[in-house]
Image (cartoon, rainbow, N blue to C red):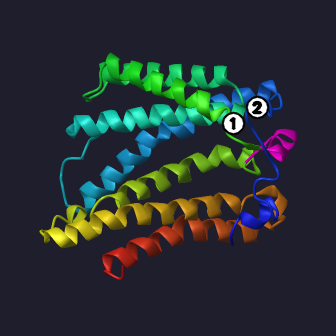
């Protein structure tokens, strides 16, 4: 169920990147890259907010938990989301300009939220998020891209028709990452000793890393070159995207690791 065999014996043999290794991308790919970066990078905020909704339900709160309740955390989330927008847009489109435009669009949306929403954000936050996105875009366009993707119009070997609906599972994965990144005692509202709290904090990055591997394998099950049937691909995807995170959560709740 690993995606590694799809890349061949040398995982980097099919990749191209760097200033002199890029092939020109089509206009359609650049347009797709703009929306891919904007929606997938920007949905980091939505995914974390979904995770906070789960947290409020578990703790039995009548009022929802909002990012605005922690201004510093909200700023960090929006800055990270802005960076993800620029990085993904530039990586997909192989264009610094596309990454810049996507970052500006995200900054404009952040400005709108700052003026209309219940938030601690300001126009300064929008400017910083845009700057982070532009800096990330310069790096993203230099990342190696699988050569076959440009020729076939895919991303990570997955066709665009899948990326249109993967946006929703992606938000669920982000919500799971937020959930697993919080100490268990904090989620359940229980008092624990310092050693237990330290163990839970150290477990968080391990859980997130496992979740990231599960997401990569879930997306990898949709690769066109695997030549799986729809049923096989669906079962593999659901196993890695849905069942694997549930398994990690259950293991943590039961205290097995």
SS of the residue under disc 1: helix
> Which image quarter holds the C terminus?
bottom left
Q: Position of residue 195 (x, y in %)?
A: 19, 72
Q: Is residue 150 magenta?
A: yes
By secondary structure, the bulk of the magenta-drawn segment is best described as helix
Q: What residue would you read off at disc 2? A: 29
The residue lying toward the viewer, choosing from 50 and 210, is: 210
Could you tell me residue 95's position as x and y percent?
70, 25
Q: Is 139 a magenta residue?
A: no
Residue 86 higher or lower than 145, as above or below: above
Assign a secondary structure to mark 2.
Answer: helix
Residue lying at 20% horizontally and 39% vertically, measured from the top left? 69
Q: Relative to the observer, which residue lies in front, 115 or 33?
A: 33
Q: Quadrant of residue 92?
A: top right
Quadrant of the rendered structure where residue 115 is?
Answer: top left
Q: Which range is magenta?
A: 146-155
Q: Which residue in the structure is indicated by mark 1?
A: 92
Callout 1: 10 Å neighbours few (<14), some, many (20+)?
A: many
């Amino acid at each position: 169920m690993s995606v590694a065999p799809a890349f061949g014996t040398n995982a980097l043999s099919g990749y191209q990147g760097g200033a002199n290794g890029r092939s020109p991308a089509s206009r359609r790919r650049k347009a797709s890259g703009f929306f891919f970066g904007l929606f997938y990078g920007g949905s980091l905020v939505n995914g974390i907010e979904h995770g906070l909704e789960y947290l409020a339900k578990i703790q039995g709160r009548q009022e929802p938990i909002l990012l605005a309740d922690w201004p510093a955390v909200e700023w960090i989330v929006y800055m990270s989301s802005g960076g993800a927008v620029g990085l993904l847009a530039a990586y997909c489109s192989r264009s610094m300009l596309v990454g810049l435009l996507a970052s500006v669009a995200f900054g404009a949306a952040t400005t709108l939220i700052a003026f209309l929403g219940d938030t601690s954000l300001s126009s300064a936050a929008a400017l910083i998020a845009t700057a982070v996105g532009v800096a990330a875009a310069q790096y993203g366009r230099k990342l190696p891209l699988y050569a076959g993707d440009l020729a076939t119009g895919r991303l990570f070997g997955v066709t665009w028709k899948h990326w249109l609906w993967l946006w929703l599972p992606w938000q669920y994965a982000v919500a799971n990452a937020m959930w697993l990144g919080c100490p268990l005692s904090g989620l359940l509202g229980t008092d624990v000793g310092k050693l237990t709290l330290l163990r839970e904090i150290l477990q968080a990055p391990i859980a997130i890393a496992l979740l990231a591997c599960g997401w990569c394998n879930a997306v990898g099950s949709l690769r066109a070159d695997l030549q799986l049937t729809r049923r096989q691909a669906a079962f593999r995807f659901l196993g890695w995207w849905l069942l694997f995170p549930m398994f990690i959560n259950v293991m943590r709740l039961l205290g097995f690791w």
